[in-house]
Amino acid sequence: MPVGPLNDIAEAFGARGALLGLDLGTKTIGVATSDPDRKLATGVETIARKNFTADAQRLLTLAAERAASGIVLGLPVNMDGSEGPRAQSTRAFARNLAKLTELPIAFWDERLSTAAVERELIAADVSRAKRAAVIDQHAAAFILQGALDRLATLAAGRNRDI
């Protein structure tokens, strides 16, 4: 299945079905999912990273449990739009994951997602310890919600062309 920018592979996701959103960190992976109608992203869990095989297996299990029709992976692009080592690592993870699944994998710019979520949690008066426990899955939900909103815009544009 395809791996690439969301705009390029949106049609591979189909019209309906839950999507899995991932915030890939060096120590953890934040996971979120959407409803089948792709209106709302919700945090699912934070996976403590072990090795690629174990991480991929857990992600694919979560995707199967939710009957996911695709995966949205946050791409850590630099503020100037360039890609550094983290983005290259994320792309490599996606290529390796694609070898294990038929699900399409889309990249979505995750610039400032963790910072935005951190601000929201602080504004909600969530303690530092509780923020640390949920920040990654909230960041994954933030990433996925941005992608869901973009998919809705693309679908509305396609419907106008009909």
Image (cartoon, rainbow, N blue to C red):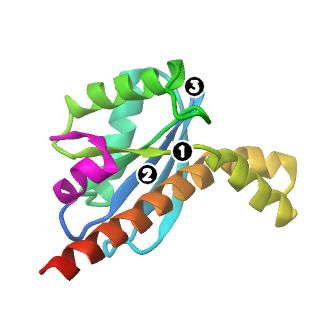
- Residue under pointer 2: 21
Amino acid under label 2?
Gly
- Among the two numbered marks 2 and 1 on one chain, the one whose residue lies closer to the N terminus: 2
Marks 2 and 3 sit apart, C-alpha to C-alpha, by 16 Å
Q: Nearer the viewer, mark 1 or mark 3?
A: 1
- Among the two numbered marks 1 and 3 on one chain, the one whose residue lies closer to the N terminus: 3
- Residue under pointer 1: 110
Considering the numbered disc 2 on the image, is that residue within a helix, a strand or a loop?
strand
**Quarter placement of the C terminus:** bottom left
Residue 116 % position (x, y): 70, 54
Q: Nearer the viewer, mark 2 or mark 1?
A: 1
Does the magenta portion include 135?
no
Task: Give the residues drawn in magenta, as a range.
Answer: 1-13
Considering the numbered disc 3 on the image, is that residue within a helix, a strand or a loop?
loop
Residue 47, can we see it? yes
At 56% from the left and 57% from the top, the residue drawn is 142
- Residue under pointer 3: 26
At 20% from the left and 70% from the top, the residue drawn is 15
At 29% from the left and 31% from the top, the residue drawn is 97
Amino acid under label 1?
Glu
Rendered view: 18 above or below 72? below
Of residues 36 and 66, the one drawn nearer to the viewer in this rendering: 36
Of residues 34 and 66, the one drawn nearer to the viewer in this rendering: 34
Rendered view: 20 above or below 3? below
Q: Main secondary structure of the magenta part?
A: helix
- Among the two numbered marks 2 and 3 on one chain, the one whose residue lies closer to the N terminus: 2
Residue 111 % position (x, y): 59, 43
